[in-house]
Amino acid sequence: MIGNSKYLSITHTGSTCLHFNYHDHALKLLNVLRVPQNKRSLISISKLTAKNDVYVEFHSDFCVVKDNTIGSVLL
């Protein structure tokens, strides 16, 4: 269900990884839902951080994903 109380159909579920070129890491995304009617991609920050040992810093016009152990920017 979305904010206007309408329900959208989920056509597929699965898992994937976000790879980045300059690190040997990939962020695991589990229980990904494919919702064709949704025009935007959404991500659960709490699930992303819990499953990948990372944290997210939010700034006024950007955000970064950092390694929880050494603090290096991953994404």
Image (cartoon, rainbow, N blue to C red):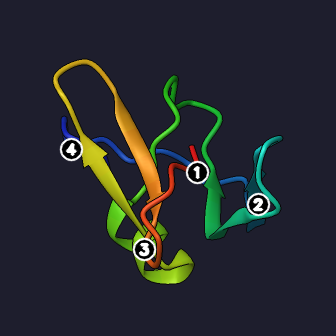
Picture coordinates of residue 13, whole percent (x, y): 72, 65
Q: Nearer the viewer, residue 13 or 50?
A: 50
Q: Earlier in the sequence, mark 3 or mark 2?
A: 2
Q: Earlier in the sequence, mark 4 or mark 2?
A: 4
CA distance separating discs 4 and 3: 36 Å
Q: Say above or below: 70 vs 63.
A: below
Q: Which residue is mark 3?
A: 68
Q: Which residue is mark 4?
A: 5
Picture coordinates of residue 68, whole percent (x, y): 42, 74
Residue at disc 1, secondary structure:
loop
Specify the label residue 74 is tagged with.
1
Q: Which is closer to the viewer, label 4 or label 3?
A: 3
Picture coordinates of residue 31, whole percent (x, y): 62, 72
Residue at image position (55%, 76%) is 52
Q: Amino acid at mark 3?
A: Asn
Q: Is residue 15 left or right of residue 64?
A: right
Residue 26: quadrant of the picture: bottom right
Specify the label residue 24 is tagged with.
none
Q: Amino acid at mark 1?
A: Leu
Q: Amino acid at mark 4?
A: Ser
CA distance separating discs 4 and 1: 36 Å
Residue at image position (20%, 40%) is 3
Q: Which is closer to the viewer, label 1 or label 2?
A: 1
Residue at disc 4, secondary structure:
loop
CA distance separating discs 1 and 3: 10 Å
Which residue lies most toward the top here? 61
* Neighbours of disc 3 within 10 Å: few (<14), some (14-19), many (20+): some
Residue at disc 2, secondary structure:
strand
CA distance separating discs 4 and 2: 30 Å
